[in-house]
Image (cartoon, grey):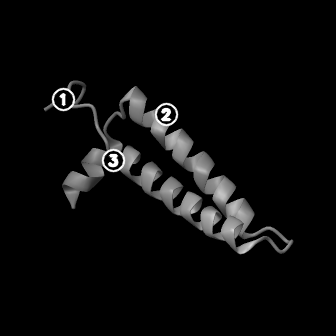
Amino acid sequence: MNEITDRIKSPTPKFFKRIRTIGLTLGAVGGALLTAPITLPTTVVTIAGYLATAGIVASAISTVAKDDTRVDK
């Protein structure tokens, strides 16, 4: 369990920071479409669900990516 905490606290490479930002954006767009107060076509709702899921997964994975060259051992 301590390894996971150390990994999350370690510096994130620039590339994965971009991926995290894109993932958060996809998740927000998907969430906004899923909670829209109007009735949307089934296809749009399905795509919104996939966007939200992809955004959450991309953000989670990019958060635990670490830069081994910067970590003090």
Give the side of residue 34 with respect to residue 3, left or right: right
- The amino acid type found where label 1 is placed reads Asp
Kindly identify which residue carries mark 1.
72
Residue lying farthest left? 73
Q: Secondary structure at mark 1?
A: loop
Q: Secondary structure at mark 3?
A: loop
In the picture, which quadrant includes the N terminus? bottom left
- The amino acid type found where label 3 is placed reads Val
Identify the residue shown where x is 41% and y is 27%: 14
Identify the residue shown where x is 46% and y is 35%: 17
- The amino acid type found where label 2 is placed reads Arg
* Image height of 61 relative to 32, above or below: above
Identify the residue shown where x is 80% and y is 67%: 36
User: Upstream in the sequence, badge 1 or badge 3?
Assistant: 3
User: Upstream in the sequence, badge 3 or badge 2?
Assistant: 2
* Image height of 32 relative to 9, above or below: below
Kindly identify which residue carries mark 3.
64
Badge 1 local density, few (<14 within 10 Å), some, or many (20+)?
few
Badge 2 local density, few (<14 within 10 Å), some, or many (20+)?
few
Kindly identify which residue carries mark 2.
18
Identify the residue shown where x is 26% and y is 47%: 6
Residue 33 coordinates in the image, percent (x, y): 73, 63
| Count of marks, rendered view | 3
Q: Secondary structure at mark 2?
A: helix
Of circles 3 and 2, which is in front? 2
User: Upstream in the sequence, badge 1 or badge 2?
Assistant: 2
